[in-house]
């Protein structure tokens, strides 16, 4: 493609300092932040998604936060379309677009123009599969998926009913496996309109795990349980994708009497750590990413200075 658009991208696991680094880079470069977080798109889900506060944003506009209700079907295709529109607007205003977040699927779909399966749904087929899962358990659906799409079955947990049903539905609608619509991170660098400069933030595992545990307790002190209780009372139940996010899923289990509060906290800490590990695995597969140890470079300020310097040379 002629004249691809330079795009600054900051990734990394949850708790690595992406928000502050992106804000400081935006202040240095005259930019605005496009958030790449599949949970921060939802309105009313603030504490549990670690949504940046007004103070943390320091006057830097953040886009694609609070753009959907928790019961909306917010797709990666919608994210790409909306991010494209924001990037075009920022460039027209002379601002540097800075994509920052930890949802690798969103980031690679935006940068590499992954092909998406069609969105039309077969609700009768979904209900049939859901009834089958309720009667026989998720394992039977997972075995069906293994037969038609072994690659997707391998990456999905056998109990992830929602995503298994979606994968089976895609095959039902298109005759093609869901895996046929995806590309490996970095594999489609020439497919899209952007020329990305990617940075990844990292820090030693024990330091990251300590941060994540501290954040869980800080979220609880800030009123996370009341936030989850309010959402549940408003009719947003555990079947919704938004309510399956870390912190929400575990606290919903507590509110429904599945386990006690201390168990919910332990599950939140454990699942944050597991999520960070999965994020590392995803992003490490992309050779374009320049990694910065957030502690070794002097924190977010040091990382932002390096990013700003390299961006100026890049463009």
Image (tube, grey):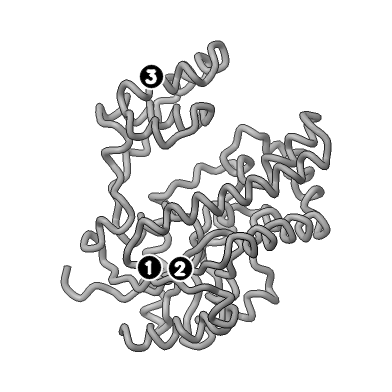
Closer mark to the observer between disc 3 and disc 2: 2
Q: Determine the image quadrant of residue 240.
A: top right
**Residue under label 2:** 200
Numbered disc 1: secondary structure:
loop
Q: Earlier in the sequence, mark 3 or mark 2?
A: 3
Q: Determine the image quadrant of residue 24.
A: bottom right
Q: Which quadrant would the C terminus be assigned to in this image?
A: bottom left
- Graded by Cα atoms within 10 Å as few (under 14), some (14 to 19) or many (20 or more), the crowding at tag 1 reads many
Q: CA distance from mark 3 to mark 2?
A: 37 Å
**Residue under label 1:** 289
Q: Is 22 rendered above or below residue 191?
A: below
Numbered disc 2: secondary structure:
strand
- Across and down, in percent, residue 167 comes to 39, 31
Label placed on residue 189: none
Q: CA distance from mark 1 to mark 2?
A: 6 Å
Numbered disc 3: secondary structure:
helix
- Across and down, in percent, residue 92 comes to 36, 79
Label placed on residue 144: 3
Viewer-side residue, 90 vs 31: 31
Q: Is residue 81 visible?
A: no
């Amino acid at each position: 493609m002629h004249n691809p658009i330079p795009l600054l991208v900051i990734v990394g696991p949850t708790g690595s300092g992406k928000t502050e680094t992106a804000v400081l880079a935006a202040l240095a470069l005259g930019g605005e932040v496009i958030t790449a977080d599949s949970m921060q798109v939802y309105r009313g889900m603030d504490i549990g998604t670690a949504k940046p506060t007004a103070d943390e944003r320091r006057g830097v506009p953040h886009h694609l936060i609070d753009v959907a209700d928790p019961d909306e079907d917010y797709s990666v295709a919608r994210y790409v379309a909306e991010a494209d529109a924001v990037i075009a607007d920022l460039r027209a205003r002379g601002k540097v677009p800075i994509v920052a977040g930890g949802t690798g699927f969103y980031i690679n779909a935006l940068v590499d123009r992954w092909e998406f399966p069609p969105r039309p749904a077969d609700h009768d087929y979904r209900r049939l599969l859901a009834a089958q899962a309720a009667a026989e358990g998720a394992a039977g659906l997972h075995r069906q998926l293994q037969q038609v799409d072994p690659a997707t079955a391998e990456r999905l947990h056998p109990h992830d009913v929602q995503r298994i049903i979606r994968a089976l539905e895609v095959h039902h609608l298109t005759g093609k496996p869901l895996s046929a619509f995806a590309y490996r991170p970095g594999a489609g660098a020439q497919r899209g309109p952007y020329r990305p400069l990617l940075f990844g933030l990292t820090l030693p595992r024990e330091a990251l795990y300590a941060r994540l545990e501290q954040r869980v307790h800080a979220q609880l002190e800030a009123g996370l349980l009341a936030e989850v209780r309010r959402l549940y009372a408003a009719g947003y139940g555990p079947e919704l994708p938004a309510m399956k996010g870390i912190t929400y899923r575990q606290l919903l289990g507590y509110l429904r009497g599945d386990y006690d509060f201390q168990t919910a906290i332990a599950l939140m800490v454990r699942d944050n750590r597991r999520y960070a590990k999965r994020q590392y695995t995803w992003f490490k597969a992309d050779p374009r990413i320049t990694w910065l140890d957030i502690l070794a470079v002097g924190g977010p300020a040091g990382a932002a200075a390096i990013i700003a310097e390299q961006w100026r040379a890049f463009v």
